[in-house]
Image: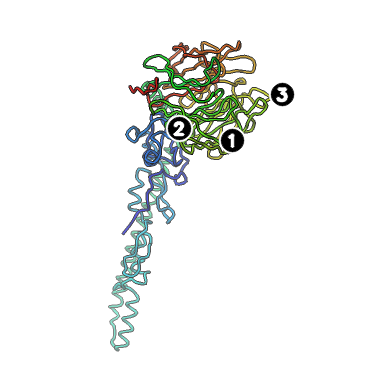
Amino acid sequence: MAYRPNDFECGYDESRFKNAVDENFRCAICLNVMKDARMCHNQHSFCRGCIEEHLRVNAQRCPQCQDRLTVATLHPVRVINNMISKLKINCDYAIRGCKEFINVEDLERHVENCGFAPVLCSNEGCGLEVNKQDKIKHETELCEYRKIPSHDFAEIKEMFQQSFENQVKIPIDKINGKMEQVKAEMDKKLFDVCGLSTKIQKEMMESRKEIRHIQQNLSTVTKEIKEMKVMMFQILGKMTKNEDILIAGGDSHGSSKSAEIFSWKEKKWFEIASMENKHSEASSFIYNDNLFVAGGGFTWSMEALNIQQSPLTWRKLSTDHCSAYMCHQTVVYKQQIFLIGGRKSYLYSSDLISEIKITGTTSHVLKELCHMPEPRWSHGAVVVDDKVLIFGGEGKKGKDCKVLSSVLKFDPRTLTFKEMPPLPYPLTKMATVQWRDQVVLLGGYDGRKSLNSVIMYNCNTGKITVLPSMLEKRSNYCAVITGDTIVVMGGEIDERKYLKSVECFEMGSSSSWTYLPSMNESRYKAIAEVLPFGQIMYKYKIFCY
């Protein structure tokens, strides 16, 4: 009886397709061509089996954007599924000799009827596995356990032997009849084989015609996908509710331990529990429902805040040695946390990229991975799709110190770097946020003065788009994006004036920046994160709305 190989729910191996497959069709988990594609609300797409297994085993979050995600909130990607269904893929049994390429949508039906499917010989005592199309020949002609058919030549030979042994003459017409019967059956099989060959040739001609048609329309389809992505981003931007913002640490007027939250519902800043240590020029990230603050102020320490727990309480994590204490960047890529560059003192800057491993609720370890082409601190770093973009910053300390305009693309899978088109001017101490598949760089310091300029960097081409300038010059400050709204907070200007002002800009619809209510304290060199659950947290309680 025919059987199928085990069908694991991950995607199709790209090597099985007749032609190259668009990168947009790859699953972000298994990296294969997606099978029954599903996506989160931020347009990150996965195989249905991959993402459901991820959500079952790991946290209920998108492995790329870390937004809250459940099986119930997954969306089917009908356009991509329809396009993948028309691609040509080889048979599951290609390794057994099947040469056919079939539309993905017809693959299951083809595999069920493929002549190269493995089957077992039904002759008693055999059980050998052969191709389905060879089963009859094996069972009737080749198998040593076969039952001899009446027209087999071995039987004719046996008939002669028995006849001579019994001294009985076998009529010649009986032998001729057997031979004619065998010849007729062989002619029928030959006719069937010729007909099958003609059918295969016809299908191959039709396949070539379909391939030419797909190649002719590939550019049109690619354009439609890009237009649809833009439209879906716009729709999701309108549907997304602005989420509350937490800011903590920094310098100026004793704010290096304090923390506060901005409520969009109340349009007001609320003070929350202070951190245990001072954190200035630190970095932050959200991982497994916890907000982590890493380093800062010439001391490497980490604190965590469980943003689903009430009352809100910071806890300190024990740590091992770190090569950079401040002015570094941390980013979350899938389930990995990367620490990038930074400095330990005014004379030492780092070119290291290390991995932070959270080993429990109270400790973490660092693992050095690779070196960047040159040291960087006070730079920007953003995860876009499956790469980390690293922008500007400052190079070596001392006499060799310089502000950089270079941009690196870091591949976490291969630990390699690619030089991208540079920024239009040197830039450090700026803020960076990701908007769709581009990165917005705000303000900063160009080596001479603080800036209020805003530019958008295309991560594929390096093209620069200039956006409306902020209302105030800012460097060493924080910025976040919630939905399509960019919010900038605090910072310092050339006169060493520390700011507590807050302003925002609506991407795609605003023509200028507008002020929001100011923070309770002026802050610069602080950290800020968007709270991902649509919750207001203040006065040690959680109020959901």
Considering only order in the chain, which callout, 2 or 1, is on the residue closer to the N terminus?
2
Q: Nearer the viewer, residue 490 or 67?
A: 490
Q: Specify the amino acid type for callout 3.
A: Lys
For disc 2, the marked residue is: 287
Label 3 or label 1, whichever lies nearer to me, is 1
Q: Residue 399 — which label?
A: 3
- The local crowd at label 2, few if under 14, some if 14 to 19, many if 20 or more residues have their Cα within 10 Å, is some
Residue drawn at the location 30% of the way across and 77% of the way down: 175
Q: Specify the amino acid type for callout 1.
A: His
| Residue 107, image x, y percentages | 36, 47
**Quarter containing the N terminus:** bottom left
For the residues bearing labels 1 and 2, Cβ distance under 8 angstroms: no
Considering only order in the chain, which callout, 3 or 2, is on the residue closer to the N terminus?
2
Instruction: Indicate the quadrant where residue 351 lies.
Output: top right
Specify whether residue 420 is in view: no
Instruction: Indicate the quadrant where residue 120 lies.
Output: bottom left
Considering only order in the chain, which callout, 1 or 3, is on the residue closer to the N terminus?
1
| Residue 316, image x, y percentages | 49, 30
- The local crowd at label 1, few if under 14, some if 14 to 19, many if 20 or more residues have their Cα within 10 Å, is few
For disc 1, the marked residue is: 321
In three-dimensional space, the C-alpha distance between marks 1 and 2, rounded to whole angstroms, equals 21 Å
Looking at the picture, the colour scheme in use is rainbow
Q: Is mark 3 on a helix, strand or loop?
A: helix
Position above or below: 513 against 396: above
Q: What element carries label 2?
A: strand
Position above or below: 106 against 439: below
In three-dimensional space, the C-alpha distance between marks 3 and 1, rounded to whole angstroms, equals 27 Å
